[in-house]
Image (cartoon, grey):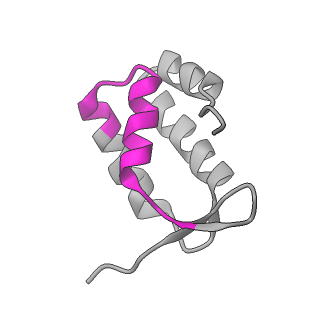
Amino acid sequence: MAKVIKVKKKSGRLQEFNERKVIIACRKAGASIAVAKRVTNIISRKVYDGVPTSEIRKMVVKELANYSNNYSKDFKMYKKPKK
């Protein structure tokens, strides 16, 4: 059974790492589903318990840049709307 990884939100709250959120963010940056899944697989291997979400964001930007600078630039501009 895989260990559950918790990420640290900006508020300090811990939340379970969700690969789906990374895929959705990559797609909103313009990446294809195939690229989004590849990036997510890479990120999933790099995350560790307690990793800040800001660090995950940096990892995603770096990985998206390997496919297209436009994806990376668009992801940097992407901000999840506040609820």
Image height check: is 63 above or below 76?
A: below
In the image, is 73 to the left or to the right of 37?
Answer: right
What residue is at 62 percent from the left and 31 percent from the top?
81
What residue is at 29 percent from the left and 42 percent from the top?
37
62 or 56: nearer the viewer:
56
Task: Please provide the residue range marked out in magenta.
Answer: 15-36
Dividing the picture into quadrants, the one containing residue 53 is: bottom right
5 or 68: nearer the viewer:
5
Residue 66 appears at what percent x and percent y? 45, 31
Image quadrant containing the N terminus? bottom left
Q: Residue furthest bottom?
A: 1
54 inside magenta stretch: no
Q: Residue furthest right?
A: 11
What residue is at 63 percent from the left and 39 percent from the top?
83
Residue 78 appears at what percent x and percent y? 59, 26
Image height check: is 35 above or below 30?
A: below
Dividing the picture into quadrants, the one containing residue 27 is: top left
Q: Residue furthest front?
A: 83
Image height check: is 3 above or below 16?
A: below
Q: How many marks?
A: 0
The dominant secondary structure in magenta is helix
Image height check: is 24 above or below 44?
A: above
Residue 34 appears at what percent x and percent y? 24, 33
In the image, is 44 to the left or to the right of 6?
Answer: left
Residue 63 appears at what percent x and percent y? 47, 39
What residue is at 40 percent from the left and 62 percent from the top?
45
18 or 30: nearer the viewer:
18
